[in-house]
Structure formats: C-alpha cells, structure tokens
Image (tube, rainbow, N blue to C red):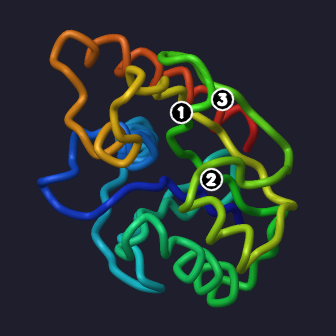
Amino acid sequence: MKIIVGLGNVGDKYAHTYHNLGFLAVEAIAKRLGVQFTKKGCDASLAFAELGGQKIILAKPTTFMNRSGTAVQKLLHYYKCNSEDLLVIYDDIDIEKFTIRFKQAGSSGTHNGMRDIVYFVGEDFKRIKIGAGRPQEGRDLANYVLSTIPTQERPQFVETIELAVDKALEVL
C-alpha cells in the first residue's frame, strides 16, 4: 500500500492559490485513476485507488498546512505503512515556477507544512515539489503563497501538475 499526500489548505478561499498546488496534484491523480475523494479519516479527505495491483491512498489533510504532520502521522499509523510508502506533493518557492523536482528524502527546506511532516515522520520519504516561484522583492511571502494564481498562469500550472502526476505514477 502507498499513500500520496497533497499539501494545501481547506476551503474555497485557498482553492486556487500557490499553496494548494499539492491538493490540485492529488485531485488530478484521482481524476486520472477514476476515483473521488469520498471518505474522511485521519484528519484528511481520502480517495482509494489501485494501480498495477497495488492499493493507493490519496489524501488531502484537513488540517491547515502548517499542521500537516499530524494528519500524515495518523495516516501512516492507521494504514500500517512506513515512511518509505509515503509520497508528498507540495508547492515550493525555492524552485522555478512551472517546474517539478523529485527527491527520495531530505529536509523540509523553507516549507512549514513539510517542516511539520518531517517533525512527526522524519526525512525518509519521497516528495515531488511543484515550483511556485518567489514573490517580487518586497512582497510578503505568506501573502504570495496564499494569493490566487493569476488566470494567465493557470494553463502552465495545469501542464506542470500533469507532469507531477506522471512522476507520481512513475514513482509508484
């Protein structure tokens, strides 16, 4: 069994923000696999799929971003998985906009949601980072990541999310 967690914040207010790129990615994985987020548990919205005979849990934590670690820890414990069975997808301001980067393990970098997951789970899990780019100089970082993605950027992010989906399914 594998668990794919997309990071984001719950609510319409955050739906199309840079900080919700992880949610958008797991929703795209669910769509590609023909499943929907119909269950709740372990502080997350859940969808269940199968790929190549392997069970997959897709999760969107219902905690706020900075508390994602509690949901991930509950998921791993409840489904009797370890960190090697985990893939987290999230936005990253430290890589170029419209790019993805896969890592086998590592630190949380500047991402507070990842910092919380690393605190609860450790660094030994796979991750896919979706480049959100940095705000213009002088613009507050929190305001940037929680701002709505401009309409003109959305088609490029749709393509980038599809690359993240391809990579996630390849990793599985």
Q: Residues within 10 Å of mark 2 (few under 14, many from 20)?
A: many
Quarter of the image with the C terminus in it: top right
Gap in Å between the C-alphas at discs 2 and 1?
16 Å
Camera-side mark, 2 or 1: 1
**Amino acid type, callout 1:** Ile
**Amino acid type, callout 3:** Lys
Gap in Å between the C-alphas at discs 3 and 2?
12 Å
Gap in Å between the C-alphas at discs 1 and 3?
19 Å
Q: Residue under circle 2?
A: 88
Which secondary structure lies at badge 2? strand
Q: Residues within 10 Å of mark 3 (few under 14, many from 20)?
A: some
- The x, y position of residue 5, in whole percent, is 54, 58
Q: Residues within 10 Å of mark 1 (few under 14, many from 20)?
A: many
Q: Residue at x 80, y 58 (%)?
A: 125
Q: Residue under circle 3?
A: 167
Residue 93: mark: 1
